[in-house]
Amino acid sequence: MKRKIKLFDPVVTGKEILYIKDILKSGFWASGAGIGYVLDFEKKFQKYIGSKECIAVNSGTAALHLALSTMNLENQEVIIPSLSFVSTAHAVLYNKAKPIFVDVDPKTLCLDITEVEKKITKKTKAILPVHFAGIPANLAHLTKLARDSKISLIEDAAHACGAEFGGKKIGSHGNMVCFSFHPVKNLAMPSGGLVAINQSNSKEVKKTLASKRWCGITERKGTFYNIKKIGWNFYMNEFSAAIGLAQLEKLDSTNAQRQKIAKRYHQEINLERKMPFDKNSCYHFYWILVKNRDQFRKNMADIGIETGTHYTPIHQFSMYRGSDKLPITESISKSIVSLPTHPNLSENDVDYVIKSINEIV
């Protein structure tokens, strides 16, 4: 039987199963009529990251959509990287704003601060950095730049659950920080997301988002409620929250395992162009840059090692294509390969991945 090493693989132990059985027996599966797993997840995640408030939703895309929906962005601009999953840009369009694509730092693949500064205009209302592959963007500079420019900092932390910057967990810095919980993510759920809120009016913002995540429902008393503004069906279900609680309990230990794997990759893979080692990163995956990428990935697949490509630049998709020229992003996207860092990898698996790469390249 051919060896099979998956690119992503969630770590599951007994807690997930126990929690799911509890919900099944209760008969209350949705958060509104649930038995408290969603609320418990919000509270525990808020404590874990140190934010002022948290609101759980059904996906990372929903989290980005809701966070930006609080800002009245119609005909305004939001600065984002093109090297990201398309949800980062879609969320800007959902809110009738224009995504302004900016190139990335070639070392971290996070937003290049100098390039961000060049793209700020009178229409700019927010900077939306992505903590790419788990390495935090430079939040010290971004926070200062946003403050000086009187615009918001909304973070896309889809890759960065458990990562740190300046001794604090990602989620406690920007005005709002958006997380994604999915079977491939460091904190896995069937599907889920969350908005962490750190503004002076955090309680008010949370109340607004709580209404928007469930069709705009407010002032609920028994079976009666009011609708004042549009909302969406974005609430998290009890099953996802329960799995998230079990995952949260072991997140720091599984991230430590990811760091250990990433450190070996950094030290032992014989390539100059690769992801740096950063003790603050949670290593959602580890990236390398190779020549002849298609052949390289085929060779890896032939020996049972799954790899990925993150990402096709958003500004090169038909609906986003324009006059943008992002030389670093465009160059990186042609050669980047994602490697597994999940904690289900054994020492022998990691040995095999490193040995195979060094032989193939």
Image (cartoon, rainbow, N blue to C red):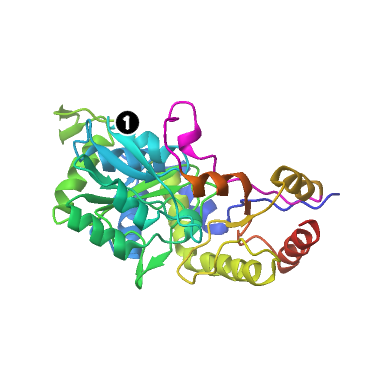
Return the residue nearer the eye: 274 or 6. 274
Count of marks overlaid on the render: 1
Q: Is residue 258 left or right of residue 177?
A: right
Q: Secondary structure at mark 1?
A: helix
260 above or below 335?
Answer: below
Look at the image and give the residue range highlighted in magenta. 303-325
Please state if 102 lies on the left or on the right of 210 as rendered.
right
Tell me where residue 346 appears, x and y as whole percent: 70, 65
> Does residue 55 belong to the magenta stretch?
no
Q: Position of residue 361 (x, y in %)?
A: 76, 57
- Within 10 Å of disc 1 (Cα), the crowding (few <14, some 14-19, many 20+) is some
Q: Nearer the viewer, residue 196 or 221?
A: 196
Who's the residue at 45% across and 69% down the image?
A: 280
Where 14 sits versus 326, above or below? below
Q: Position of residue 257 (x, y in %)?
A: 58, 68
Q: Quadrant of residue 171?
A: bottom left
The residue at the point 23 percent across, 59 percent down is: 52
Regarding residue 249, the answer to whether it shows in the image is yes
Which residue has dot 1 on it? 94
Q: Say left or right for 347 vs 284.
A: right
**Residue 130 horizontal side relative to residue 197, left or right:** right
Q: Amino acid at mark 1?
A: Tyr
Residue at 36% in and 38% down = 62
Res 360 → quadrant:
bottom right
Q: Is residue 241 above or below residue 33?
A: below
Q: Is residue 177 visible?
A: no
Quadrant position of residue 199:
bottom left
Main secondary structure found in the magenta portion: loop
Rendered location of residue 178, percent (x, y): 35, 49
Residue occupying the point 25% across, 30% down = 231
Q: Is residue 304 magenta?
A: yes
Q: Residue furthest right?
A: 1
